[in-house]
Image: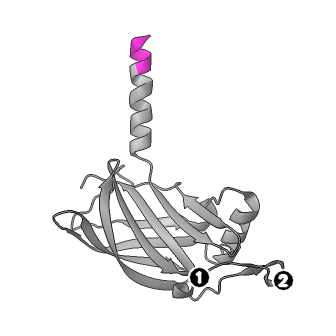
């Protein structure tokens, strides 16, 4: 029986260690929202950040989940998931500093690409980076709902969390 618990614990540990996600946080004049995509993984299990092969991540826009069906549907509509079903994240450069990692990351949505300098740190055995971006960076006009009574703000917080062997 103890062996069964040990195996279950190890499986849970490895499943959690492999979980990657990209999270987009935003707000309206009324509320906040969080949309997460955790349905992707590296072909080799962990992401490798060697100069020879930096990660190139393809996200299915329909895999983002915002916590409720209507919000998820609206988010996918904003990103025009039918016409542009994929969002990509490509690491252009990755450098280790004394306390963190610095990366140049290219995000592509709806045929619009934008490069960002992102600082990453190790948190809970994962490489985590955060960057403030805007809908307008990708030529997306933040939507309005209910005749303009609800206005989505242009500012977004983008978070990357990747299992790695850095």
Residue at (61%, 76%) from the top-left corner?
84
Asked whether disc 1 touches disc 2, contact meaning CB atoms under 8 Å apart, the reply is: no
Determine whether, in the image, residue 44 is placed left or right of residue 136: left
Judge by depth and name the residue closer to the eye, 26 or 102: 26
Q: Which residue is mark 1?
A: 154
Q: Earlier in the sequence, mark 1 or mark 2?
A: 2
- The colour scheme used here is one colour
- SS of the residue at dot 1? loop
How busy is the neighbourhood of tag 1: few (under 14 within 10 Å), some, or many (20 plus)? some
Residue at (26%, 52%) from the top-left corner?
165
Across and down, in percent, residue 123 comes to 34, 52
Across and down, in percent, residue 43 comes to 39, 54
Q: Quadrant of residue 27?
A: bottom right
How busy is the neighbourhood of tag 2: few (under 14 within 10 Å), some, or many (20 plus)? few
Q: Quadrant of residue 117?
A: bottom left
Across and down, in percent, residue 13 comes to 40, 35
The relative height of residue 164 versus residue 85 in the rendered view (above or below) is above
Quadrant of the rendering where the N terminus is positioned: top left
Instruction: Give the residues in magenta.
Output: 1-5
Q: Which mark is residue 147?
A: 2
Q: Is residue 62 magenta?
A: no
């Amino acid at each position: 029986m103890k062996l069964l618990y040990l195996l279950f614990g190890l499986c849970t540990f490895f499943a959690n260690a492999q979980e990657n996600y990209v999270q987009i946080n935003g707000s309206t004049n009324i509320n906040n929202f969080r949309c997460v995509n955790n349905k992707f993984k590296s072909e080799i299990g962990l992401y490798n950040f060697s100069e020879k092969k930096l990660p190139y991540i393809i996200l299915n826009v329909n895999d983002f989940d915002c916590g409720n069906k209507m919000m998820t549907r609206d988010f996918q509509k904003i990103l025009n998931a039918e016409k542009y079903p994929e969002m990509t994240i490509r690491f252009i450069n990755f450098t280790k500093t004394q306390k963190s990692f610095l990366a140049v990351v290219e995000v592509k949505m709806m045929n619009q690409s934008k490069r960002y300098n992102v600082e990453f740190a190790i948190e809970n055995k994962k490489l985590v980076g955060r960057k403030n971006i805007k809908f307008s960076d990708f030529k997306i006009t933040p939507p309005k709902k209910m005749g303009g009574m609800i206005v989505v703000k242009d500012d977004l917080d983008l978070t990357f969390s990747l299992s790695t062997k850095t």
